[in-house]
Image (spheres, rainbow, N blue to C red):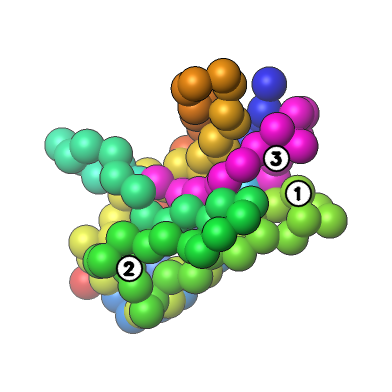
Amino acid sequence: QVQLVESGGGLVQAGGSLRLSCAASGSIRSINAMGWYRQAPGKQRELVALIPSHGSTNYADSVKGRFTISTDNAENTVYLQMNSLKPEDTAVYYCNAKVPLLATMINYWGQGTQVTVSS
């Protein structure tokens, strides 16, 4: 089991910045990737950024050059630095941890944190 606790959402004007944090606990050594997803009203949840234990980070095209995902392994925390925010970035942001189990992947989710960007 992996537990994820997010923080850092809020209201910001367009062009502003926010940093989201996600602290992981539990079976941390079993995690092989962590990331951030978001879900806007009426839309499906989508990948924002993913950082695997081994390999390159992956970003949605819509956030490349503006968002940066990083980890602090000593603190078991993943961050999402969001710069040059746009109104279309408004969504609930969810922290995600992926744990392989046999031939499948288990996804663990945080509770979500609201990000609202005003125009």
Q: Which SS type dominates the magenta stretch?
A: strand
- Disc 2 and disc 1: Cα gap in Å? 24 Å
In-image side of 108 versus 119 (left or right):
right
Residue 78 placement (x, y as % from top left): 63, 54
Q: State the residue position of label 3.
A: 24
- Disc 1 and disc 3: Cα gap in Å? 6 Å
Category of crowding for the residue at label 2, using alpha-carbon neighbours closer than 10 angstroms: few (below 14), some (14–19), many (at least 20): some
SS of the residue under disc 2: loop
Instruction: Look at label 3 and name its amino acid.
Output: Ala
Instruction: Look at label 2 and name its amino acid.
Output: Val
Instruction: Examine the rendering and report whether any part of residue 108 can be seen.
Output: no
| Residue shown at 69% from the left, 45% from the top | 23
| Residue shown at 35% from the left, 48% from the top | 47
Residue 20 sits in quarter: bottom right
Give the magenta part as a residue range.
23-37
SS of the residue under disc 1: loop
Quarter of the figure with the N terminus: top right
| Closer to the camera in the image, 45 or 31 | 31
| Closer to the camera in the image, 51 or 45 | 51
Mark 1 or mark 2, which is nearer the start of the sequence? 2
In-image side of 81 versus 15 (left or right):
right
